[in-house]
Image (spheres, coloured by chain):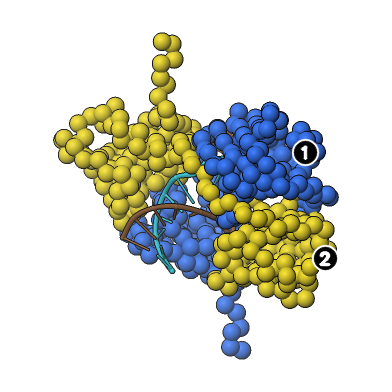
Chain colours: A yellow, B blue, C brown, D cyan
Amino acid sequence: MGLKDICSLDAFVLYGTFSVIYSGRAESELDRGQYMIIRKVDGTLLVHGSTNITPRNYQGPGSKLSVIGNSIISCNKKGESLTIVVHRITQIFKPIAWSSNKIKLSKSERDLVNKIVAEMDKYIPNAVFISKEHQTRVGSIDIYVVDINEQEHVIEAKRAKASLATGSQVSRYLGAFPKAIGYVMSPSISKNAAIWCQEHDIKYVRVEHQDPESNGV
Amino acid sequence: MGLKDICSLDAFVLYGTFSVIYSGRAESELDRGQYMIIRKVDGTLLVHGSTNITPRNYQGPGSKLSVIGNSIISCNKKGESLTIVVHRITQIFKPIAWSSNKIKLSKSERDLVNKIVAEMDKYIPNAVFISKEHQTRVGSIDIYVVDINEQEHVIEAKRAKASLATGSQVSRYLGAFPKAIGYVMSPSISKNAAIWCQEHDIKYVRVEHQDPESNGV
DNA sequence: TTATGGATTTCGTGG
DNA sequence: CCACGAAGTCCATAA
């Protein structure tokens, strides 16, 4: 089976000896070695080494393959190219009826935002206006609240640990809503971020994905 | 070849019908379907669907496999688990002498920082002190410069397009260096970020990875 | 170990 | 198509 035949397949996996050159947003070289090449049905191309979750080289959905000599060349619309020099192919495998299902995830930030909104009394009593993903010129605010005293509140939620960048984000929102009170709400926060928030009058509120419910009943 | 035998291998690829459950930082379910399971020599485990660069589910380096009934269970040190229910295995493949080479990359942010420093005269004349990755309590500043007039300069470099977050980052640094002049240096910047920077007295300087050299000579 | 920020981030969503 | 921010981000690096 020739290289051109292989590359005309919807999807395939190659194992063998290759070297890889990438040119586009950046430039990279991958020394000759044994790698796994994966071509997916959406036009994704992956070069996997023996370690790590992320591929050594890749090209995203929609890339087109061509064969020149003993090289596979993948191009995308932005003019980026991935050149795989084929030295030797040890294994070829053709995936059949490969599923495109996506995972169903919970405990995402969206879930946390919904939980905070549902329990808003606990954090901001007497809210009269609550807006999620509140669009502004300085970005989208996770939760924007106005209470009965017309006090504004700007909340940034993080599903995991809040960082300095999280604090900066709230600070940027406060620049556009100078009378608002800023909050970071998350299960945890880095030490420096906690200090920084305190210094900038941003309140930190610990929130969990699920309530610490009924432990000892 | 039994499931336990397979899972005792350093590395393997399975293709077949599986369903996957993840529990850890978050929770997820992947419906029964045909996927590619990749086990790497460093303990990485991947579940790839037919689209996208990123795997549907994964576990990073160092995860341990065990087999219970017809399920493969991968656990890591943080108590996260990935359960792959094996309905049917169509293909097994064992990668031999899989290379661990890493790519050599250029045009990274580090390269851009070095270029800016090398040409500092063009941007900030009469610099007497230049520090890369300047550590502060509010984070690491890409380039910190003091000129002959004791004026401080704080530069954030971006290898690609600068965003609002980039501006926020500089603003955070300026909070700790209130007398400094702030800069964003990158090949491009989003419109809102450009406006925001201007409003906050942060200078935007366009820099290219390579000089627009000798075009018409 | 934690903390911090880059990344060819990738990916989804909304304008 | 751009813009923006989440992500089980991942990953390297420094403290």
Q: Mark 1 lies on which chain?
A: B
Relative side of A204 to A91, left or right: left
Percent coordinates x, y for residue B105 in the rendering: 67, 60
Residue in view at x 41 percent, y 10 percent: A217
The answer for how far apart the CA atoms under marks 2 and 1 are is 29 Å
Q: Mark 2 lies on which chain?
A: A
Q: Quadrant of residue B41?
A: top right
Q: Please determine whether, in this image, residue B55 is positioned above or below residue A111.
A: below
| Front residue of A43 and B208 | A43
Q: Which mark is residue A206?
A: none
Q: Residue A87 carries which label?
A: 2
Percent coordinates x, y for residue B210 in the rendering: 60, 71
Tell me which amino acid carries mark 2.
Answer: His
Percent coordinates x, y for residue B169 in the rendering: 45, 50
Circle 2: is it few (<14), some (14-19), or many (20+) Cα within 10 Å? some
For mark 2, give the secondary structure: strand
